[in-house]
Image (tube, rainbow, N blue to C red):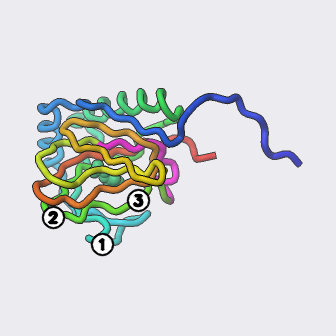
Amino acid sequence: MLFLRAIPHEETDALAWYYYDKGFSSDECSQVIELAHKYKEITAELGPDAGHLDKSARDSRIRWIYPEDTSEWLFKKLEEMIVQANDQNWKFNLHAFYESIQYTVYDPGSAGYSYHYDIGNTIQSQRKVSVTVNLNDDFEGGELQLRVGAEPVTVKPEKGKVVVFPSYMLHRVLPVKSGTRRSLVLWVGGDHYR
Ligand SMILES: O=C(O)CCC(=O)C(=O)O
């Protein structure tokens, strides 16, 4: 019995990642921080259903920015960047923002966030594209690393830089040596992997 059928070939790179150097202006970064501070702060948890605290693996505080009138511009801006990056790179079928935007603060001396994928069970099983925004760069350490091949690619943290990558790509945030690191993360979903 034949289960496999030929599909039209389209050149994509499943291990590509993409960035916008100054995706957010300095003013926009400040606006995002101000907006985020309207939402409740919680300690970041680990695991597919969260509920697990391990500061050696994930050491940050987060706030969820919900989709509403005051945050609409931010969702729209991220959406445009994600759609463009997706069209140029992976061509996933993207559907919707199922999740809120995560604003994250890594305090001085934070252990960062150890290697992880953004995919998992439930809602995470349909995550396709992850996007992260560097809201500041007045800190040391805290680099985002993407595990594309045998060696990780280190993304220099620059204020306003937006990094877009497939949610199945292994990545981590290195420990923060000094200063406070602030970032945004959003995941966009699509069809089930099939
Ligand atoms: O803060 C970042 O740049 C990325 C954080 C991250 O990987 C995550 O929250 O899943």
Judge depth for marks 1 and 2 and give the one in front: 2
Q: Residue at x 29, y 65 (%)?
A: 58
Q: Which mark is residue 54?
A: 1
Residue 129 belongs to magenta span:
yes
Residue matched to label 3 = 116
| Amino acid at circle 3 | His
| Ligand 1 has an atom within 8 Å of the beta carbon of the residue at disc 3 | yes
Which of 69 and 19 lies nearest the eye of the viewer?
19
Considering the numbered disc 3 on the image, is that residue within a helix, a strand or a loop? strand
Residue type for callout 1: Asp
Relative to 146, does residue 74 appear above or below in the rendering? above
Residue 22 in the image: x percent, y percent? Answer: 23, 30
Residue found 48% across the figure and 44% down from its top: 128
Q: Amino acid at mark 2?
A: Gly
Along the line of sight, the residue nearer the viewer: 168 or 185: 168
Q: Earlier in the sequence, mark 1 or mark 3?
A: 1
